Structure formats: structure tokens, C-alpha cells
Amino acid sequence: MDILEPELAIIDSHFHLFDLPHIRYMFDEHLADINSGHKVIASVYSETRAFKRSRGPEVLQPLGEVEFANGMAAMAASGRYGDYQLCAGIVGHADLTHGAAVGELLDRCMAAAPDRYRGIRQVTLDYPDERPFKFIMSGRPPGGILENPNLIDGLKALAKRGLSFDAACYDTSLPRLTDIIDQVPDLQVIINNSGNLVLVDMGPADKAAAINTWRKNLSELAKRPNVSLKVGGFGMPTWEFDAPTEGDDNPHITLAKQWQPFLDSCIEIFGSERCMYGSNFPPDKRASNYATSINAHKYMLKDYSKAEKEAIFAGNAARIYRLSLH
């Protein structure tokens, strides 16, 4: 497969590492993806809670994952594996339903990874029915987090320390998220995976209505200058896109033709200065390999300006996550 625009620098703003019974994606597997042809110079680690501590107070257990990610970053920083800056930014986990009590965790995470720790993500995957949860091996996650009265105090603890909040919710929760963001206007918020639109098991009319509502909700969010958007995550099955078939000579074009309207909507709504590319690997492996996924995004952006592509693929992530790149 030919790599499109191989000289274009990329910061992968959203990837995970796992070592679980049902999935393993560690440094070796990730490095193989990084070395598949594109010029990926750095990445931002996003929490999975896979390496949290098994002992101690529950509110502090996410510290273990930050220590793990910082250790992986230190390995990469040795230069033994090339110039790639693994986990140049670290987004850890915190249970914000503890309210202001998460402050101790945040302080300890900042001390554990002072050059890389940039904020937290707490997954808030509520949905009115069960359709999107059939793809989650662990089943439906805990609900009601966005309604918890302690959440705002937890978010204020982030803002007080200059840390950011990565928001992972399905599209139907975007209005509630907007209401919450308005209560902490000085908090940097990054919406994950293009707003996680759910289109699975819908007929054409329902899909069209869901897409229109998704666009409207993203447009309302984009009025807040403290909110940015990660474009990617289109390989997740909840979007109900078709993966390329075996033998497809141009799998990146097959993907791009399906993804293009949604990527264009994201950039139209948030502007090229507030969108950043994130691979969402390994979950997005369902759709394609790493090199093909990036090729698809480059193909979709082929008619954008050089400055816009540089911002979306690297510059915005470096600025918004305050990455220290050598």
C-alpha cells in the first residue's frame, strides 16, 4: 500500500494500551503500527483503567495507570526505539463523582508525570436503549455519571489545576454535556471520537434524523471556545460503516467515502483550529489497520490547505495538550 503524504507529521491524539485477557496492545504492537509508513512523531495516551492499582483507596487507584504510561514514555524517550515520543501527553482516569476529593489524585498524578500528565477522561456512555452496548465485552458501563451532583466539583478541581477533561459520551448525551461545560467555563474540554454518533440498527429515516441532531448538538458545543474535538473513531461499530473487503485494492478510499461527510461536518462546525486527529487504536482495528486508517484520513483531507492539514494532524494536539516536543 502506498503511503499518502509520508512527510506530513502526525501526533496521534487518542490511543490506548491494553494487556487484558481478551486484548493485548502494548508498546511492541503499537510500535509496529507507528512504523508502518506514516510520520507519527508523538502520541497522547488515553485512559482505559487497565493498569490502575489494585490496592489502596478507590479514588487514588487510577494513579497506577499514569505511572504505567509515564514508564512507557520513558522507554521511548531513551531513543532506543527511534524518535517517536510515545505518551508525550497522558490523559488518566478519575472518578469525578468523588467531587473535590479527586484533587489528591490529580496532584499525585501531576507529581508522578510532571512533563506529560495533562488531564483525565471519565467514560460516560449513557444511551436510551441497549443497541450500542452489544459491542462492549464487559457489558453496559455504569450510568448516571453526568447527572451526579458531585461531578461539577470534580471538574472544577481539574480547572483549578489547569488540567483538561476528555469527554467520552454518546451523541444523545451531548446536550447534557453542554449544560455541564457551561458551569465550568474555564475548563479545557476535548470531545472524543467525533461525538460518538450511534447509527447502528437504524433505518434510513432514523439515521438521517440522528445525523441532523448530532450536527446540531455539536454546533451548540462549538459555540464554547474552551471545547475542541478529536476527529476519528469512525472504525467503531456503532457508526455502522462497512469495513473494506479482502482484496480491496484501495481500502482507504472505501473507508473515506463513508467517513467523509462526518469528518467534513466536524471540521465545518469546530474549524480546523479546534479539530485534532486521533486513531482510537486499537478499538478502530475493527475497520482497518493503522496505516490504512491514517491514509483514509489523509485522503479525506486532500482538498484542505497545507496549514489546515498540519493543524489537524499535529499542531492542534501539541497546543491543546501543551506537549513538550523536542
Image (tube, rainbow, N blue to C red):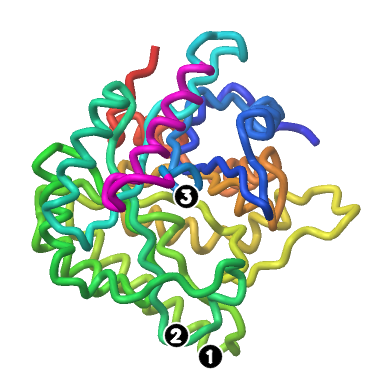
Q: How crowded is mark 3: few (under 14 residues within 10 Å), some or many (20 or more)?
A: some
Number of the front mark, 1 or 3: 3
* Residue at 45% over, 29% down: 87
Label 2 residue SS? helix
Residue 205's label in the rendered image is 1
Q: What residue type is labelled 2?
A: Ala
Label pair 1/2, CB-CB below 8 angstroms: yes
Q: Is residue 169 above or below residue 67?
A: below
Furthest-top residue in view?
Answer: 79
Q: In this view, does 168 lie above or below 106?
A: below
**Mark 2 → mark 3, Cα distance in angstroms:** 32 Å
Residue 209's label in the rendered image is 2
Considering only order in the chain, which callout, 3 or 1, is on the residue closer to the N terminus?
A: 3
Judge by depth and name the residue closer to the eye, 166 or 294. Answer: 166
Q: Is residue 6 above or below residue 51?
A: above
Pick the quarter of the image with the N terminus: top right
Label pair 1/3, CB-CB below 8 angstroms: no
Residue 145: quadrant of the picture: bottom left
Label 1 residue SS? helix
Left or right, residue 166 beside residue 10: left
Number of the front mark, 2 or 3: 3
Judge by depth and name the residue closer to the eye, 8 or 291. Answer: 291
Q: What residue type is labelled 1?
A: Ala
